[in-house]
């Protein structure tokens, strides 16, 4: 990998949660929430992110059903990932993101944050969970319960 960092993506049609992790350290931390604008501005943001963060790979969470089968949102996330790879020239991996948002919500409630405080954090904490899960599985998306990278 040419870059130094992994970047986790909690894909959304309006907001995209972003987390980062140093490849060697392997500790994911929330980075930001990107408010989508238009294709040109989105491309500029992600190209800059890839360069500034020295991104080795993006890890995009796929929203799948409880049984592991892909959803319509999975197709949207895959299309976004393909666009992201083409736009930035950085490889993209996909991982099962089941329950990441719920985990983020529980963690914020446990921390005593009010609903108004949680809104801005939810997406980047979900991205952190996506990236942490990827790292814990040995940085291989094929270890997902349903081999999500193998589907087209």
Image: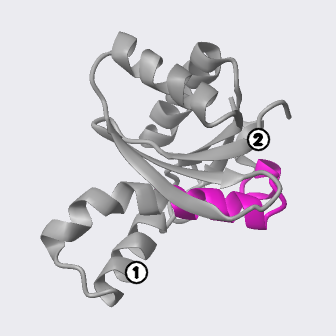
Residue occupying the point 52% across, 53% down: 64
Magenta residues, as a range?
Answer: 127-146
Q: Which numbered circle lies on residue 4? A: 2
* Circle 1 Cα neighbour tier, 10 Å, few/some/many (<14 / 14–19 / ≥20): some
* Residue 136 is one of the magenta-drawn residues: yes
Q: Residue 130: percent from the left, percent from the top?
A: 58, 58
Quarter assignment of residue 150: top right
Decide which of 3, 35 is in the foreground and name it.
3
Tell me if mark 2 has few (under 14), some (14-19) or many (20+) residues whose alpha carbon lies within 10 angstroms of its own. Answer: some
Q: Name which of mark 2 and mark 1 comes first in the sequence.
A: 2
The residue labelled by disc 1 is 107
What is the quadrant of residue 115 in the picture?
bottom left
Report x, y in % for residue 114.
17, 78
Label drawn at residue 89:
none
Is residue 104 positioned above or below 127 on the image? below
Marks 2 and 1 sit apart, C-alpha to C-alpha, by 28 Å
Which residue in the rendered view is the most extreme toward the left?
116
Give yes or no for residue 73 being in the magenta stretch: no
Q: Residue at x 39, y 21 (%)?
A: 42
Q: Position of residue 10 (x, y in %)?
A: 47, 48
Q: Is residue 129 left or right of residue 4?
A: left
Between tags 2 and 1, which lies in front?
Answer: 2
- Quadrant where the N terminus is found in the figure: top right
Identify the residue at horizontal 72%, vertical 55% (top origin): 146
Quadrant where the image shows the C terminus: top right
- What kind of secondary structure does the magenta stretch mostly adopt? helix
Asked if residue 109 is positioned above or below residue 104 in the image, the reply reads below
Confirm or deny contact between disc 2 and disc 1 (CB under 8 A): no
Of residues 54 and 136, which is closer to you in this image? 54
């Amino acid at each position: 990998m040419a870059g130094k960092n992994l970047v986790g993506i909690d894909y959304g049609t309006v907001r995209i949660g972003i987390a980062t992790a140093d490849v060697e350290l392997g500790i994911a931390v929330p980075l930001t929430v990107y408010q989508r604008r238009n294709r040109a501005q989105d491309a500029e943001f992600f190209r800059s992110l890839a360069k500034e963060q020295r991104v080795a790979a993006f890890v995009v969470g796929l929203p799948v059903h409880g049984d592991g089968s892909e959803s319509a949102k999975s197709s949207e996330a895959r299309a976004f990932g393909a666009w992201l790879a083409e736009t930035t020239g950085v490889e993209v991996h996909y991982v099962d993101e089941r329950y990441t948002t719920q985990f983020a919500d529980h963690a914020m409630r446990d921390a005593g944050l009010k609903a108004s405080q949680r809104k801005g954090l939810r997406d980047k904490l979900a991205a952190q969970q996506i990236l942490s899960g990827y790292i814990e599985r040995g940085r291989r998306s094929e270890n997902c319960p349903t081999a999500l990278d193998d589907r087209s």
